[in-house]
């Protein structure tokens, strides 16, 4: 087996790496004897120092032009490209997803860096006409100052870049609090930010637990913006804290109970393929994973037969080994969540089609390995935990429905609204579904997964509060200001307002 070293990470504050007094270990979820790194357990004092450094650096960073700042992002993009393989392997080793997914995470990160570098030369404001001919009116985007970026573990390289790079491009400075499950991926990104030449204080990292480092960041009086991606429970908590300060803004991108809808005219090859990818890529641990397959009852028996045949062929193992389709779950809590959702489905009357197993043979004994759990109901059962709550694991329901309208009604019956895919050959049907289902990311004849950085990434209802990541994030980290200049020798007001004194 390939030997990897253990990385000793540190907090990075005001341009220098800091020694930590207390540390914790980041373990490989496929082999918990493999210590990926040692990590500082940050404190409120570290948060205070990092926010102070970011606040001080903001004064000069904001003075540069968007193009100047984009040039630093471009240098970072080139370094990321150089280290693509190493980062891809680190993603797999630290969060367990198979190597092609680890690499895809880093490729997406690279696309984000390239996109943001290009954005530096795009319009970042515009001129509009005034009612008064002698006036010029402008709409400009101004940075907000210190941005806290709090990120989840499941896309440990791409998601941090969706939020950090647009923030610094716009002239803000950043304190990055990565997931405690994937700190070494974050450490490697920080080392590249340093090498790319971001000035001291512009990007800082504080490692540690959500309840102390994350919470201290959200509460800090000098943090103007919180960009959070993670679970609904934590996102809601963060919104409530941020709401206490009138000036503070929190963009929260959260979970989903996504679905793939398979209509009666669907191409079943596409349907089965899309449903397997949507449900089981990253072992069901994507915010956009399909936990529900809503299938027209006219084709449901044939779909279910083909789907379950394919699912039984899924290989579960170490993501660094070729041929693995599904890696481990991230931690013991993830396995416990999977067990709980499976037990609830059985308790709520589901017919279990594939009984998921915990693997403990020699090849799997040191990791958090489970196999897919698949179940069905004869007809939709409202108010069930298993059909409404995010399982974030390979736990999938098949729900037969009669026609497109019932499919969408069932789809909408959760508090979430993140991702929706529909499989159909009928353009009138997908258009109707497009306009009546509630989601932030919609797909036709595709799985419910598959982000691209130049599109907004976010959800509606309890999945997101309307400030999507990737393409969508610049608006969250800038104030849109109006600026008007008079070129006449007298004052002429809009709306015919009198100037007589
Ligand atoms: P999580 O909510 O447990 O943690 C996310 C981040 O929040 C971590 O860095 C964590 O340390 C921090 N945190 C925890 N408690 C905090 C607190 N009290 N104050 C401040 N920060 C705190 O989520 P996770 O387990 O890392 O990720 C899985 C969840 O993220 C799933 O629900 C998934 O659907 C969601 N997710 C959403 C998106 C999206 O774009 N909508 C993308 C990926 C993952």
Image (tube, grey):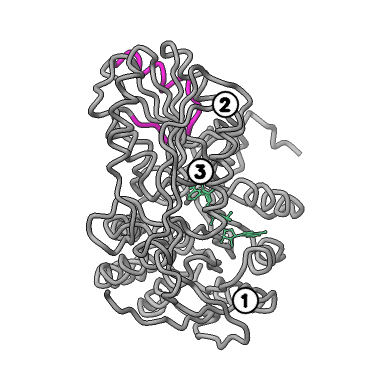
What residue is at 39 percent from the left and 21 percent from the top? Answer: 295
Q: Position of residue 85 (x, y in %)?
A: 25, 68
Circle 2 — which element? Answer: loop
The magenta stretch spans residue 442: yes
Within the displayed image, which quadrant is ligand 1 positioned in? bottom right
Q: Residue at image x 39%, y 24%?
A: 261
Mark 1 vs mark 3: give the one in front: 1
Location of the N terminus by quadrant is bottom left
Q: Mark 1 points at which residue?
A: 42
Question: Which residues, given as a range, are shown in magenta?
Answer: 427-443
Helix, strand or loop at label 3? It is strand
Q: Is mark 1 on a helix, strand or loop?
A: loop
Residue 177 or 175: which is nearer the viewer?
A: 177
User: Dot 3, how many residues are within 10 Å of its Cα: few (below 14), some (14-19), or many (20+)?
Assistant: some
Question: Is the shortest distance between ligand 1 and the CB of mark 3 under 8 Å?
Answer: no
Q: Given this view, does label 2 or label 1 mark the residue nearer the observer?
A: 2
**Disc 3 versus disc 2: nearer the observer:** 2
Q: Which numbered disc, 1 or 3, marks the residue that appears first in the sequence?
A: 1
- The residue singled out by tag 2 in the image is 349
Contact, mark 1 vs mark 3 (Cβ under 8 Å): no
68 to the left or right of 222 = left
> Sequence-wise, which precedes: disc 2 or disc 1?
1
Q: Distance between the residues labelled 1 and 3?
A: 46 Å
């Amino acid at each position: 087996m390939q030997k990897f070293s253990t990385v000793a990470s540190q907090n990075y504050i005001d341009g220098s790496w800091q020694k930590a007094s207390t540390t914790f270990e980041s373990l490989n979820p496929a082999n918990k004897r493999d210590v990926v790194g040692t990590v500082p357990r940050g404190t409120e004092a570290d948060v205070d120092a990092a926010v102070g450094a970011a606040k001080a650096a903001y004064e000069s960073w904001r003075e540069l032009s968007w193009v100047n700042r984009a040039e630093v992002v471009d240098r970072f993009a080139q370094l990321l490209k150089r280290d693509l393989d190493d980062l891809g392997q680190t993603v797999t080793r630290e969060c367990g997803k198979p190597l092609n997914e680890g690499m895809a995470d880093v490729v997406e990160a690279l696309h984000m860096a390239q996109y943001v570098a290009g954005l530096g030369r795009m319009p970042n404001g515009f001129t509009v006409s005034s009612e008064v001919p002698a006036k010029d009116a402008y709409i400009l985007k101004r940075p907000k100052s210190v941005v806290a970026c709090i990120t989840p573990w499941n896309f440990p390289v791409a998601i941090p870049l969706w939020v950090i790079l647009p923030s610094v491009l716009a002239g803000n400075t950043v304190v990055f609090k990565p997931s405690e499950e994937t700190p070494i991926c974050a450490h490697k990104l920080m080392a590249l930010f340093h090498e790319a030449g971001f000035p001291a204080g512009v990007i800082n990292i504080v490692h540690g637990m959500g309840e102390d480092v994350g919470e201290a960041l959200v509460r800090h009086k000098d943090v103007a913006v919180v960009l959070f991606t993670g679970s609904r429970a934590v996102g809601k908590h963060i919104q409530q804290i941020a709401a206490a300060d009138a000036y503070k803004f929190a963009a929260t991108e959260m979970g989903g109970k996504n679905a793939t809808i398979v209509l009666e005219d669907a191409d079943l090859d596409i349907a089965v393929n899309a449903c397997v990818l949507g449900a089981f890529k990253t072992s069901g641990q994507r915010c956009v994973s399909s936990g529900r397959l809503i299938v027209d009852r006219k084709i449901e028996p044939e779909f279910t037969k083909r789907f379950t045949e394919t699912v039984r062929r899924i290989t579960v193992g170490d993501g660094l080994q070729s041929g693995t389709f599904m890696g481990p779950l991230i931690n013991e809590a993830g396995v416990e969540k999977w067990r709980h959702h499976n037990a609830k489905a059985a308790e709520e009357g589901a017919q279990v089609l594939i009984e998921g197993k915990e693997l403990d043979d020699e090849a799997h004994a040191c990791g958090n390995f489970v196999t897919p759990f698949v179940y069905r109901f004869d007809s939709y059962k409202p108010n069930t935990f298993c059909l409404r709550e995010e399982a974030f694991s390979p736990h999938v329901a098949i729900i037969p429905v009669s026609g497109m309208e019932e499919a969408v009604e069932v789809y909408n019956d959760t508090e979430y609204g993140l991702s929706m895919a529909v499989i159909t050959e009928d353009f009138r049907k997908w258009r109707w579904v497009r306009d009546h289902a509630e989601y932030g990311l919609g797909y036709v004849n595709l799985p419910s997964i598959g982000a691209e950085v130049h599109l907004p990434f976010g959800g509606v209802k309890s999945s997101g509060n309307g400030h999507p990541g990737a393409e969508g994030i610049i608006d969250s980290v800038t104030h849109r200001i109006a600026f008007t200049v008079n070129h006449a020798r007298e004052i002429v007001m809009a709306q015919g307002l009198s100037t007589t004194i």
